Amino acid sequence: MATAERLEARGHDPGEVFNQPPPLKQEDLFGDDRALVEAVAREDGDWAAPRLHQLGRLAASDEAIAWGIQANAHPPVLRTHDRFGHRIDEVEFHPAWHRLLEVAVEHAVHALPWREPTPGAHVARAAAFYLLAQVEAGHGCPISMTHAIVPALRSEPALAAEWVPGLTSLGYEPGLRPPADKRGLLAGMGMTERQGGSDVRANTTRADPVATGGPGGEYVLTGHKWFCSAPMSDVFLVLAQAPQGLSCFLLPRVLPDGALNGFHIQRLKDKLGNRSNASSEVEFHGAWARLVGEPGRGIRTILEMVNHTRLDCVVGSAAGMRQAVVQAIHHAAHRRAFGRLLIDQPLMRNVLADLALESEAATALGLRLAGAFDRAGANPQEAAFRRLATAVGKFWVCKRGGVVVGEALECLGGNGYVEESTMPRLYREMPLNAIWEGSGNVIALDALRAMAREPETAEAFHDELLLAKGEDNRYDAALTAFEARRGEDEAEGEAQARRVVEWMALLLQASLLIRHSPHELASAFCAGRLDPRRGLAFGTLPAGCDLGAIINRSGPLSQP
């Protein structure tokens, strides 16, 4: 007798589904996230809470979840020529992609600090980015670059006056048309080339002046870019070799007369993740561009943009961790094995609590950085802290994202390995933030360089760590050990860069949790991350940690 027949003979319907968790229904991705709500409030963004609740409810809706699924199930398609052989260089996207961008733009996720330059604006904007990144990460790329280009353009008032109004508009209008004819604009960036990668000084793209006369001088660009993300954007910041050296240029896709601007898309990248977003290889064939910043100082000019996108790498990684942990806790709260719910089994509770610690620490660090971006203009201490802490946070949080999502996926077992769970999409996204805007070695060395060339950054960072001193013996011991080893690690040079930056990140996260999170959570973080006897895998928190309190703080409201 077949198995199904035997079960049916015993009174079991083989089509019945039981011991499976119900669909996760979140009401408000903002209001349900206690760590996020608290971080927004303490970093001066509480005024934005009503709009964040509104966006959080939209992000939790079935409709928004479907946009994310559809945009990734139907990736962009490149059309280089029309049927008559004319070059068109267009990328077609699914309507869900356009809806995601429309929502982000309507909520000013691309422009809030520039439209409303009030205390906490960067924090409110980071929180909004965090919410939408949980729905779908790929559309965050053009949103991030559009946000980040504005401070770079403001170094040239004439260019800023021409472009910033469109880049900060709340209208989204896809398609290639002259910028003056569109309700709103999006921006991209092109730095790396196939022969150099992160070593942008090895770039070979040539910029030949066609008109001079000070800022915004006109040039013609000839060359290529190996990774050009969101190639359907309206305008790009790119690096090219001018007669005076590597310089930064503003390159529009369409010229004022409607002609395409010598920007040829060679192919779209077939990527591990971020599949909803088009990343491309492009060539410039006499593309018209305008100089931004001083000639020969292109890296310094474009770094203003890079610093803002690095913040989004941290926030986006924290968002992916948050959604993965919520999925894992929800599954464990409804799935039974060996006679008990998974969430009631001691080892699973340890794993879930450990993941929740990592998620909250990432969120706290990301929002603290956003607060520093808000305060940096008027506070030199915060500016110095931002410079170093952004690199430290980018290195560590983006590194941890992949292992957190991987462990959370394992909590779901085979149910997490299938596409319908969304866990594979979250997992595939995580390496991007670790690579984009500087991979691990580049970022770790940047942090060391900042401390060497700008000693005030190390002082500001250390002052931040001292704010938590005296509250936890393990933290105090780890801070003292770090201070004692700093000179030794620096003497060993670049080979120890990752070790130094890792400890800086852990101490910064511990400092934030000690000062701002419930005692049981901060204590468990110090035990699990700073104690030299700690385990290396998730789920190795020592006895005495209040696992239930940590899980309850981080779990979805649907948890029983």
Image (tube, rainbow, N blue to C red):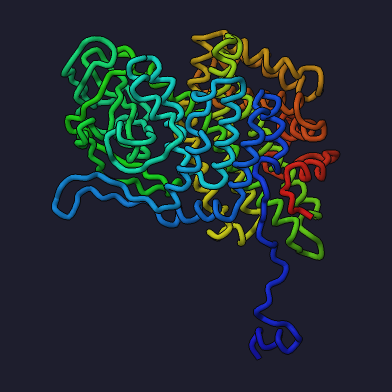
**Horizontal arrangement in the rendering, residue 73 relative to residue 518 (left or right):** left
Quick one: which residue is furthest to the left in this view? 84
Quarter where residue 150 is shown: top left
| Residue 487 seen by the camera | no
* x, y percent for residue 85: 14, 50
**Horizontal arrangement in the rendering, residue 481 relative to residue 151 (left or right):** right
Quarter where residue 357 is shown: top right
Front one among 329 and 209: 209
Q: Which quarter of the figure is the C terminus placed in? A: bottom right
Q: Residue at x 65, y 44 (%)?
A: 29
Q: Residue at x 59, y 46 (%)?
A: 59
The number of numbered badges drawn on the structure is: 0
Q: Residue at x 33, y 16 (%)?
A: 158
Q: Is residue 75 above or below residue 210?
A: below
* x, y percent for residue 165: 40, 26
Front one among 257 and 381: 257
* x, y percent for residue 428: 50, 48
**Horizontal arrangement in the rendering, residue 275 relative to residue 37 (left or right):** left
* x, y percent for residue 275: 42, 49
Quick one: which residue is furthest to the right in this view? 544
**Horizontal arrangement in the rendering, residue 380 relative to residue 364 (left or right):** left
| Residue 87 seen by the camera | yes
Q: Is residue 465 above or below residue 73?
A: above
Q: Which quarter of the figure is the N terminus placed in? A: bottom right
